[in-house]
Image (cartoon, helix red, strand yellow):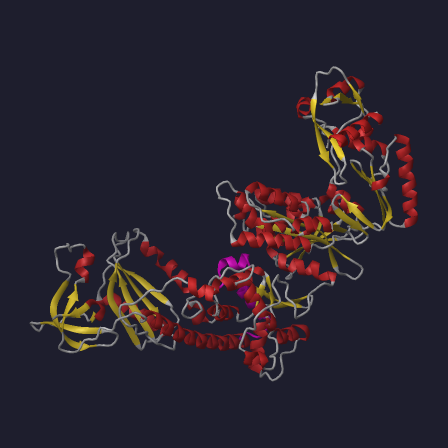
Amino acid sequence: MEPLMRKELDKLIESRIIFPIKHSSWVANLVPVRKKSGEIRLCVDFRDLNRASLKDHYPLPSMEQILQVVAGSERFSLLDGYSGYNQIMVKEEDQFKTAFTTKWGTFAYRKMPFGLSNAGATFQRAMDMAFKGLINNVVLIYLDDITIFSKNAADHLSHLRQVFTRCRKFGVSLNPKKCIFLAHEGKLLGHIVSKEGLAIDPERVEAIRALPLPSHKKALQSFLGRINFVRRFVPDFAALVKPITKMLKKSMAFKWTAEGKESFEAIKEAISQAPTLINPDFSKDFILYAFGGNDTISAILVQQNKDNDEQPIAFFSQSLDDYEVKYSFIEKHVLAVIRSLKKFKHLVSNNKVQLLVSHAGVKDFLLNKDLNEKRVGWITRVMEYDIEIKITKLVRGKGLCEQLVLGKQKEACNEGEVVLTVQDSHEPCGTQEENNAAPTPCWTQGIMHFLSIGLCPPKMNKTQRRHFRLQAIPYAIVDGVLFKKYVNGVLLRCISTNQIHRVLEEFHGGSAGGHFAPRVIALKIMKAGYYWPKIFSDCYAWIKRCKNYAFFTGKERLAALPLHPISVDQPFMQWGLDFIGVINPNSSQGHKWILTAMDYFTKWTEAVALKEANESSILDFYEGIATRFGIPATIISDNALAFIGSKRSWHTKLKSALWADRITPKRSTGNSPFKLVYGREVILPMSLELPTLELMKQLELLEFEPMEVRYAELMELQEVRNQASQAMEKDQALIKKTFDRKAKDRSFQVGDLVLKWDVDREKSGRHSKFDAIWSGPYMVTKCKNNNAFQLASLDGEELQIPVNGIYLKRCF
């Protein structure tokens, strides 16, 4: 190291950049740094001098603006200043302040050294003065990086001549080893600039892909700093890094979760597939897509080329603060518009912008004359731009934005390909016999055929065609790929039949997996942006064959007696009634009881608050059910009283509780009671603000005749009910099998003597450890279904309420 340091020191002395000095009140330490070429750069630690210096706030050019101006040019020349800072003279009376000490003596700088806090601002001011009149037209200057750009080779020679003239005039020296002339593309500020536009330097991409998983918070901060440099190339960058940025919170321990690791790999993959950003054409209008998510906002600025294909200029995304997360759906979209316009102001301020949003409420918000304080502030920021607002059904967040932009590059995958990081060595989904069978048509073909030319598959009758058209409403084709609109409006890519097993393997046991439960895997797949019609049932079937999941599944509850499920196959034919009470404290109006009823098929619930649990109240409640739903064939009550502690306003919350229960899907049927009763899912008030798939479906049905729509809904309702009935049978069989696994059948015959567990005394708190918990003996007088037995005392007095066998044991 010392020979190289001495050689570099002699070189600086010969170049009259430094000189020996005997006495100085300022002395700093020398810090040698090795360059990429292997040579040594002598740096000086000027921290003390910098603290004492007044700050020069001369601005440096925006790197983003430089790159966007240069990109798209035909020819480039990239020039590098020779020891750039060393070309600026230091004022003679200040030279002693730059002194530094070495083993060969003390030296000071005649010319400006690296390491001074104001060196960059001083050098940039000098370069701007030297090339005044040429900047932004012929040349762009960022410190000692000089970029000459031209639309053709002839102009470029003229531009070179003008730049060289200025270099001679002001004594700017260039390093010929680092200069590139008349290039079609070149590296500039860590990017690749060319006629096609702006791209990330492949060497930088490979460096990011090679980064290991950070092991502590500082390493994670360093990683985020490196990738933030290229965030304008990545759609919805803020949403991608959200799981990782949460790990930096002081309140959270640093620990990698499955979601965090998945995000880490997804970011690197997104950067490796980043598109080329085109140079803006200020003779054309701009198109801005804006979208507001749950906790992030995003936007894409695009322009159309000669073929009317939209190509990206830049991507924008930002995480929302805690108070902004509470904004409404519309307000988040408007916030995305405002902040993206601010981000792209240097591009769109003098041009017309077509603003494309997914909801008419955004347009109403910006054009509404009824202004409050918030709207006045927001709308004022938008009014300075020339904006035309358009509503489009195609804007559904980042998934569609990627298709609109990345798909235009003609790099879409073939039908048989899936964009997943999985290995090719996959086992077949089915048996050998199934795999050798003739291939079945892909489920997507019929829908894509209908969406393309409007024709249903052949051999369908009129009813089937109506039903098929209704089923096709949530689907859309984007760049030749079928997507399904999910309930939150996001488009999910439809997976073809031959791709399903690859997706299942990746998301259950692959790098994106974790051997989670079937429902978790299905939701995870849809969250990632994929869909097929039997996604839930396929997940259940797939996981049944997974040994890892089977070994670590939680243990099941065991029953004391064999289960006797109650079977029913029609709505409102069999109801279960039960009392809840006495409730203490009573309600403010004196209610003590809740009488509940549930239909065993649809799981529809009814409830009423009662002051007294008498015959009159029960009859009134029964009449209300019978007049609305018909007279039930069977009414079942278990005669048990449940105690529920509540506040004195509980009677006012019954309707809300019933509503929440009726619209919640049940495991046994797979549907909500509301859907099984009315034939469709409920449309909540929030759906009007945040459109759901059900709302979009109802709106699309307006083009059909009302009777046709109703007939189709009834057909679909009958199908759903049939499926629910089959699902309940399977569910009951599964529950019984689980319940009976270690159950003991306690059978009694008429005439048997038994003891009865005194449940009421134990639950009332009147029972002490010295009291017997079994009473009797009693004689069994009648055996009923479902392990219920009628008992009588030895005196012949019969108990009014049958007793479940679980509370009985033989008396010997």
- Residue extending farthest to the front is 3
| Highlighted range, magenta | 682-706
Q: Position of residue 721 (x, y in %)?
A: 44, 75
Q: Is residue 236 left or right of residue 147?
A: left
Residue 120 visible within the image: no
Q: Is residue 792 left or right of residue 246?
A: left
Judge whether 226 appears above or below 697 on screen.
above
Q: Is residue 712 left or right of residue 15?
A: left
Q: Quadrant of the C terminus?
A: bottom left
Q: Is residue 429 left or right of residue 579?
A: right
Judge whether 597 appears above or below 116 on screen.
below
Q: Position of residue 783 (x, y in %)?
A: 20, 77
Mostly what secondary structure, the magenta segment? helix
Q: Residue at x 15, y 56 (%)?
A: 767
Please name whichever residue, 457 or 111, is drawn nearer the observer in this view of the structure.
111
Q: Position of residue 246 (x, y in %)?
A: 53, 46
Please name whichever residue, 146 or 613, is drawn nearer the observer in this view of the structure.
146
Q: Quadrant of residue 15?
A: top right
Please name whichever residue, 171 or 15, is drawn nearer the observer in this view of the structure.
15
- Residue extending farthest to the top is 23
Q: Quadrant of residue 637?
A: bottom left
Residue 442 visible within the image: yes
Label tally: 0
| Residue 685: in magenta span | yes
Q: Position of residue 345 (x, y in %)?
A: 71, 44
